[in-house]
Structure formats: structure tokens, C-alpha cells
């Protein structure tokens, strides 16, 4: 329904939770001076985003050995110098849903080499929430060189299985040190086949609930640095 007038924040929050319109975080902000309240649509990223983008009919490919995505940037707002040709709705109704909506928008442009660059921003909210399962999320984007997770909230995610598998060209992964992986159960083949990757910073990662680390860095021949992981307890974990 419409936002009620002349009610306090707590009562309105209770109403919204009862209606199940928000399932992770309730965002309420004051609008104008008349004490109306506006609930912002959380920015849930769609687990099926690759299929959505590939089917958008703008020439972006996301299949193995034919993808033409070069860079991905998760940002709060679209940079002023990003000359977007258009956008594709890659939001989801909830963190577990694959139903597409426009809570998150992927803006794109094509460079002179016919490679696409994506900047992904929330439509209303300030935060983009990762799907609860990030399994295969960026798998086999073989031409992807850079991905920036500056605005990508991973709190509560449970799977990082094969998330970057066979990203052969990937050299820069920005913002991984800010990821909350404390609920992740599996990191099976997380970076497997990232053959150009040389450096990662996983120092802050909490692996206390992770049980499967099997082939996490398999076929990463030039990866030399992953940060200070001396606090990782890998005893009794599948490796």
C-alpha cells in the first residue's frame, strides 16, 4: 500500500516487515517535510544475470570462449565519464530469486575492439546485495580482465563454488578484502583456471564455516600472493 502519514518509524517498519516487502534490510528515509516515509527497493543482484544479459539482444556474449565482457564495476552510482549506450535490468526480487526486476541496472558500452564494459548500480538503494549462492556467478567470462566489487555486499552468502572458474584473462579483482565470507560453506574451485591472476588479498576472510576448499586455486600458475592467511584454520576442511 501507500506509505502511511503521521506514524513513527518503528510502526511503519513493522508494517513493511509484516507485508514481507523487504527480506534482508529495511531502508527507510525521510521524504520532504511532511513526514511521509519512503521504503527504498533493496538492490538484489540476480544469480542468473549472465543469461539475462546474453538474451538482451544488444550483442553482449557470456558463454564460454565467446564472451566479450572486458570489465565489470559494481558501483553506487554511474560514473560521469561512463558513456553508457543503454542498460539492462539485472535485479532480483530477493536474494534467492531469479525473477528479474530493475532494482539493479547494468549499464554498458562497447569499445573499439567490440568488447563490452559494464557498470552495475542499484536503482534506488545504495547497496547491491550478492545472491545467497554465488556459485558460477562469473564463471567462464574468458575475456574479463577487471572486476571491481566496491559496492557488493556478501553478508550471508553460502556458496562461492566456481565463482571465477575459467576466467582466463582476469588480472584485477578489486574489493575482495571487504567481502564477508563468514557464512560460506564451500569455496570449491573458486579461482580455478584463473591463469592470468597474480595477486589477491584474502587477508580478512573468515573461513570458520567453510568446509570445502578443494581446488580453490587449481590451475592458477602465476598466482603468487593471496595476502596474510596465517589465521586460516584449514584443518579438517576438504582440500
Image: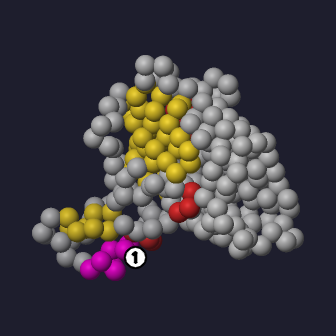
Q: Quadrant of the N terminus?
A: bottom left
**Image spot of residue 172 (x, y percent):** 56, 45
> In this picture, is 64 found above or below 101?
above
- Res 30 quadrant in image: bottom left
Q: In this view, does 148 lie to the left or right of 212?
A: left
> In this picture, is 71 found above or below 58?
below
**Image spot of residue 196 (x, y percent):** 66, 38
Q: Quadrant of the C terminus?
A: bottom right
Residue 96, can we see it? no
Q: Which stretch is magenta?
A: 8-15
- Magenta stretch: dominant secondary structure: helix
> In this picture, is 49 found above or below 238?
above
Write the residue at 19% across / 76% down.
Answer: 6
Q: What element carries label 1?
A: helix
Question: What residue sits right under mark 1 in the picture?
Answer: 14
Q: In this view, does 19 lie to the left or right of 30?
A: right
Amino acid at each position: 500500500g501507500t506509505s502511511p502519514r503521521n506514524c513513527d518509524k518503528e510502526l511503519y517498519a513493522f508494517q513493511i516487515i509484516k507485508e514481507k516487502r523487504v527480506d534482508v534490510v529495511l531502508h527507510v528515509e525521510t521524504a520532504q517535510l511532511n513526514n511521509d516515509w519512503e521504503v527504498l527497493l533493496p538492490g538484489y543482484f540476480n544469480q542468473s544475470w549472465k543469461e539475462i544479459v546474453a538474451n538482451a539482444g544488444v550483442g553482449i556474449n557470456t558463454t564460454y570462449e565467446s564472451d566479450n565482457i572486458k570489465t565489470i564495476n559494481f558501483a553506487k552510482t554511474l560514473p560521469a565519464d561512463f558513456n553508457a549506450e543503454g542498460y539492462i535490468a539485472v535485479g532480483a526480487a530477493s536474494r534467492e530469486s531469479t525473477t528479474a526486476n530493475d532494482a539493479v541496472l547494468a549499464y554498458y558500452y562497447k569499445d573499439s575492439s567490440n568488447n563490452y564494459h559494464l557498470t552495475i548500480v542499484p536503482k534506488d538503494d545504495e547497496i547491491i546485495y550478492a545472491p545467497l549462492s554465488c556459485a558460477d556467478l562469473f564463471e567462464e567470462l574468458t575475456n574479463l580482465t577487471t572486476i571491481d566489487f566496491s559496492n557488493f555486499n556478501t553478508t550471508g552468502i553460502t556458496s562461492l563454488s566456481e565463482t571465477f572458474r575459467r576466467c582466463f584473462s582476469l588480472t584485477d579483482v578489486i574489493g575482495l578484502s571487504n567481502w564477508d565470507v563468514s557464512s560460506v560453506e564451500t569455496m570449491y574451485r573458486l579461482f580455478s583456471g584463473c591463469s592470468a591472476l597474480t595477486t589477491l588479498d584474502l587477508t580478512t576472510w573468515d573461513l570458520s564455516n567453510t568446509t570445502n576448499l578443494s581446488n580453490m586455486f587449481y590451475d592458477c600458475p602465476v598466482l603468487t600472493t593471496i595476502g596474510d592467511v596465517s589465521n586460516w584454520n584449514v584443518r579438517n576442511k576438504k582440500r
